[in-house]
Image: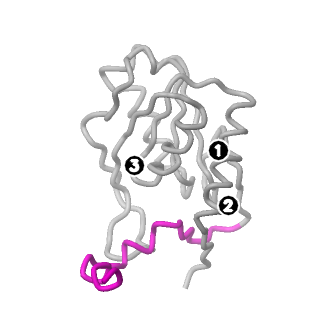
Amino acid sequence: MAEKLIISFKEYSQIVEKLAVEIHKSYKPTVLIGIMRGAAPIIDILSRILKLPIAYIVIQSYSGKGMEDQQGQLMFAREISSLAKNEDFKKVLLIDDLSDTGLTLNKSIEWLKNYGPTKNYIKEVKTACLWKKKSSSFEPDFCPIRLSSDPWIVQPTEHYEDLSIEQIIEKNK
């Protein structure tokens, strides 16, 4: 079984706050773009702290039944989901939860720079994540935790993937 790094809600919030401080000190993005699903809670917190508009890219990359499934072929949604104006995409901060292999962040930058509605507005793309694993070939611009190994990171909401709605109903009777 792979090494696991289990993260509590409190630890998670603290790591996101460290990321916010790191970004604030050296970069002034005009929009935050989160890679779904991993970036959902991160971008929610960062947008509240940094007071910035947000956008989402939906990508499916893991396949299989369990939490520790392997990364498969990347599939991008057709559109970015956002209420941000095209002009807001001048200085993009692209966010994911972690840099595992680096493939998702690399391909997302490439996709974003070719995305029709906003590609002519983008002047700069920087990246952020909470964790960078040792074997990742991608170097994020902002990353508070750089790991010396490649553990499976069990994030605070991940346990829901192994629960059915029936189990949750039973638990909440």
Q: Say which label, 2 or 1, has the lower sequence index.
A: 2
Image disc number at residue 134 = 2
Estimate the x, y position of residue 36 in percent, counting from the top left: 39, 49
C-alpha distance separating marks 1 and 3: 19 Å
Where is 45 relative to 69, above or below?
Answer: above
C-alpha distance separating marks 2 and 3: 22 Å
Q: Say which label, 2 or 3, has the lower sequence index.
A: 3
C-alpha distance separating marks 2 and 1: 11 Å
- Name the quadrant of the N terminus: bottom right
Q: Which residue is mark 3?
A: 36
Give amino acid for label 1.
Glu
Point out the stretch of residues depicted in magenta: 149-173
Q: Residue at x 56, y 40 (%)?
A: 46
Q: Which residue is mark 1?
A: 139
Residue placed most toward the observer, 167 or 108? 167
The residue mark sitting in front, 2 or 3, is 3
Estimate the x, y position of residue 30 in percent, counting from the top left: 53, 22
Estimate the x, y position of residue 26 in percent, counting from the top left: 73, 28
Q: Residue at x 68, y 55 (%)?
A: 14
Label 2 secondary element: loop
